[in-house]
Image (tube, rainbow, N blue to C red):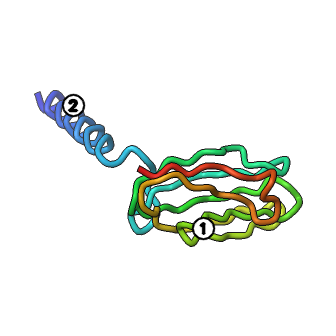
Amino acid sequence: MQRGRVKFASILVLAAALVAGGCGSNGGSAGGGGEKLSLEAQGTKFTTTSLDLKAGQKYTLTLANKDSVEHNFTFQQANADKDAAGGATVEATFDAPAAGSYKFFCKYHPAAMTGTVTVS
């Protein structure tokens, strides 16, 4: 009988952990409650050219530079401007501006490396 109670208690603990793990936001969290974003620079282009954000939300963007030359993430409306040396990975933290459509780019290669930020 004792063994049955232990097994039942273990199942309850597991079920509670699964329910608790399912709670929270849809995106990943960064320190300070911000949402995480990832962006790669490779072949003198961004591998992702669109970002969807929520107005007023804090974000931490990780830029992984897969090239040997320096790249940059600039999102002027959010005052985000972060350089990444060749082969480096850096983070830029910013608050999303008001709803609208904006551009992000690499200030070293603005014609080739650009994307759109949609803020809702």
Q: Residue at x 35, y 48 (%)?
A: 25
Amino acid type for the residue under numbered disc 1 = Gln
- The residue identified by callout 1 is 76
Residue 64, position as x, y percentages in the image: 71, 56
Q: Pick the residue in front: 93 or 28.
A: 93
Residue 87, position as x, y percentages in the image: 81, 60
Q: Which mark is residue 39?
A: none
How many numbered badges does the structure rendering display?
Answer: 2
Determine the CA span between mark 1 and mark 2: 57 Å
Left/right placement of residue 21 relative to residue 53 reads left
Q: Pick the residue in front: 98 or 40.
A: 98
Q: Residue at x 85, y 55 (%)?
A: 67
Q: Residue furthest left?
A: 1
Q: Residue at x 50, y 47 (%)?
A: 52
- The residue identified by callout 2 is 7
Label 1 Cα crowd, 10 Å radius (few <14 / some 14-19 / many 20+): few
Q: Pick the residue in front: 78 or 86.
A: 78
